[in-house]
């Protein structure tokens, strides 16, 4: 019997082994696709895993395994499969698309930008790029991208809000206001958006609107913290709803007995609203806590001057400056403003 040369034998054996592995890989891949199409994602993933044990570079199996795991919200596993596919084929558009979204969801915004730039024409890439630029504090690029997104879909509430927030973070408050208003109209359930809009109005001295949106936020479940109640309370006072405002602020004071900052702020708020007797009431509370409170004495002096008792008020201000010479600067400021 003629002997087969060893080299040829080895080649034939390897070819047979490779063919068997390829056949097995394809078989398990097809079983995986059947289960995936039937929406049996766990069974599908197991078959795709089996296919990959026979051929770790099986691109279709990597892609479909990634999709199956996404359906099961196993994002770490899915990301691993898409990453492996991208490493094997850096031009693979489905892998790039999924990695763009996953990096954004994982808040890895620099990587999201990197992959979004490689995924031209992919659905949602323009928005992810713009939103990532916002989180990376590149507000100019974010605004440009978001305006482009909204030109195509003007009712994208998240893009509208992020555009408003971009202007806010750039301290362009007037530019932020219309976008915040539109965002709250598009999605009234976002209580944080309503609260931020209230703060935006508050900082623009539009206190009635501030109170409206603080209340909208509360109606939608925004936490009623002391800070929230304090902001709403001052918004009420500055918009002329004194009883509502004082009630809220006193409720905070009851939780923080003797808090001088709250008492002082209430006194200043009433003074600003030309309610000098109410301001004096809170100045008195401050001096009951500390008879050496020069700021409270100075504030009381200003109130008496506004009430027409100029000599008495002036004497109190002079006494306060003796106690705290730094208050002389406040006098100069008041004189400049004609107070």
Image (spheres, rainbow, N blue to C red):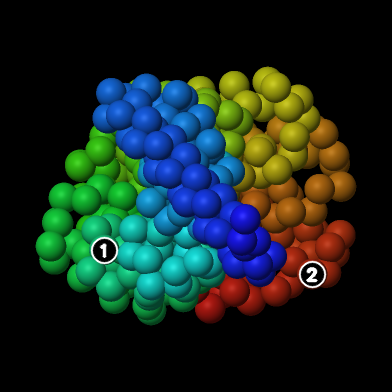
x, y (%) of residue 183? 26, 48
Q: Residue at x 44, y 69 (%)?
A: 89
Measured from the top left, where is residue 18 in percent x and y?
53, 54
User: How many residues crowd around disc 1 within 10 Å: few (fewer than 14), some, or many (20 or more)?
Assistant: some
Callout 2 secondary element: helix
- Which residue is nearer to you in this view: 28 or 318? 28
Say which quarter of the image contains residue 132. Answer: bottom left
Q: Are marks 1 and 2 in contact (CB under 8 Å)?
A: no
Q: Can residue 151 be seen in this snapshot?
A: yes
Q: Secondary structure at mark 1?
A: loop
Relative horizontal placement of residue 227, taking residue 67 as reference (left or right): right
Percent position of residue 16, x then y: 52, 52
Query: Residue lying furthest front in this view?
Result: 1
- Judge from the rendering whether residue 205 lies leftward or rightward of residue 301; answer left or right: left
Q: Which mark is residue 122?
A: 1
**Does 29 appear above or below 330?**
above
Q: Is residue 211 visible?
A: no
Mark number displayed over residue 326: 2
Q: Nearer the viewer, residue 65 or 268?
A: 65
The quarter of the image holding the N terminus is: bottom right
* Residue at 14% in and 56% down: 154
Name which of mark 1 and mark 2 comes first in the sequence: 1
Left or right for 251, reference 119: right
Spatial CA distance of label 1 from label 2 is: 62 Å
């Amino acid at each position: 019997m003629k002997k087969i040369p060893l080299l040829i034998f080895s080649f034939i054996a390897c070819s047979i082994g490779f063919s068997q592995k390829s056949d097995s890989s394809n078989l398990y891949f097809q079983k995986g696709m059947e289960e995936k199409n039937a929406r049996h994602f766990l069974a599908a993933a197991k078959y795709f895993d089996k296919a990959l044990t026979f051929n770790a570079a099986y691109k279709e199996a990597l892609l479909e395994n990634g999709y199956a795991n996404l359906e099961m919200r196993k994002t770490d596993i899915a990301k691993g499969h898409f990453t492996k596919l991208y490493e094997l084929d850096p031009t693979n558009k489905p892998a790039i698309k999924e990695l763009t979204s996953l990096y954004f969801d994982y808040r890895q915004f620099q990587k999201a930008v990197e992959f979004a730039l490689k995924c031209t024409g992919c659905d949602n890439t323009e928005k992810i790029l713009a939103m990532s630029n916002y989180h990376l504090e590149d507000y100019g690029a974010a605004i440009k991208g978001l305006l482009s997104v909204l030109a195509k879909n003007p009712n994208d509430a998240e893009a509208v809000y992020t555009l408003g927030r971009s202007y806010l973070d750039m301290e362009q408050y007037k530019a932020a206001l219309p976008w915040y208003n539109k965002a709250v109209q598009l999605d009234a359930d976002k209580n944080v958006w309503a609260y931020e809009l209230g703060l935006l109005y508050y900082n623009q001295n539009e206190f009635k609107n501030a109170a409206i949106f603080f209340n909208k936020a509360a109606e939608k479940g925004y936490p009623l913290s002391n800070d929230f109640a304090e902001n709403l309370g001052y918004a009420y006072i500055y918009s002329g709803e004194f009883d509502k405002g004082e009630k809220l602020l006193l409720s905070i004071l009851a939780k923080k007995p003797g808090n001088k900052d709250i008492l002082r702020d209430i006194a200043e708020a009433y003074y600003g609203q030309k309610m000098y007797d109410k301001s004096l009431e809170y100045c008195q509370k401050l001096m009951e806590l500390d008879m050496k409170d020069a700021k409270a004495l100075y504030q009381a002096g200003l109130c008496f001057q506004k009430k027409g008792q100029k000599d008495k008020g002036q004497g109190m201000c002079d006494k306060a400056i003796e106690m705290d010479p730094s208050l002389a600067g406040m006098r100069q400021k008041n004189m400049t403003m004609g107070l």
